[in-house]
Amino acid sequence: MLSKADPRVPNVWRDWLSDSGSLTERLLDLSRGDLKVRVLRQNLEVPRFSERQLLDLSDRRRAMVREVILYGSGKPWVFARSILPLPTLTGRLKKLRQLSDQPLGELLFNDPTMRREPVQYACFDSGNKTLPSSALSAGKENWGRRSVFKLDNKPLLVAEVFLTDFNPYN
């Protein structure tokens, strides 16, 4: 993972990667309201090692893992992977279990208890095995970010990767 100041992060991506607001809102504006969510999968499973570390989960602790593609103006713009630990999905946050095709960002940024921890940045290429092969194009770099959010002091992790069909100058 890279920091915002890392010289390897292209200038064209810095604004999108470091934006502290809602990516969902920004994509809605850019697409003039034509933003759709396609759920690729949503399962209970043990998250990846780095995800467990960020969320302070034990090795065998399962969480709800949700992977989606956000389509702007009919094109796949963003791949998102969210990790929601089971203790986070209790009480009033139980509603997060039933997101369906609703953007998670909409709920996060409208929650008055939401706090966001520092953002991590990364570049993914077509050889990356942590993303679906359909999300990456051969020979292209895809920039992404992830951060832990806390709602009612309960953590969840959101990772977002900008896909080849997304142009930061759209």
Image: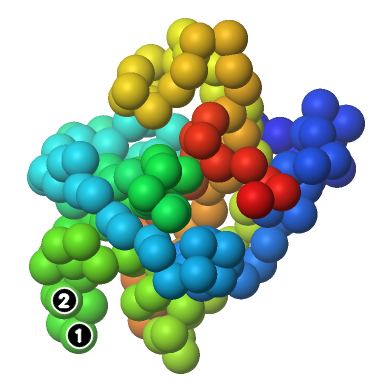
The quadrant in which residue 8 appears is: top right
Q: Position of residue 101 (x, y in %)?
A: 20, 61
Q: Are marks 1 and 2 in contact (CB under 8 Å)?
A: yes
- Mark identifier at residue 11: none
Q: Is residue 92 left or right of residue 105?
A: left
Seen from the viewer's position, the closer of residues 127 and 134 is: 134
**Visible in this render: residue 158?**
no
Q: Is residue 90 above or below residue 139?
A: below
Label 1, label 2: how far apart the Cα atoms are? 7 Å
Q: Amino acid at mark 2?
A: Lys
The quadrant in which residue 136 appears is: top left
Seen from the viewer's position, the closer of residues 94 and 22 is: 22
Q: Amino acid at mark 1?
A: Arg
Q: Is residue 38 left or right of residue 140?
A: left
Residue shown at the point (65%, 51%) measured from the top left: 170
Q: Position of residue 18 (x, y in %)?
A: 71, 55
Residue shown at the point (84%, 41%) measured from the top left: 11
Nearer to us: label 1 or label 2: 2
**Visible in this render: residue 18?**
yes
Q: Is residue 15 left or right of residue 47?
A: right
Residue shown at the point (33%, 23%) measured from the top left: 134
Seen from the viewer's position, the closer of residues 160 and 117 is: 160
Q: Which residue is mark 1?
A: 92
Give the SS element for disc 1: helix
Q: Neighbour class for label 1 at 10 Å: few (<14), some, many (≥20)?
A: few
Q: Position of residue 118 (x, y in %)?
A: 64, 57
Q: Is residue 48 above or below residue 85?
A: above
Give the SS element for disc 2: helix
Q: Which residue is mark 2?
A: 95
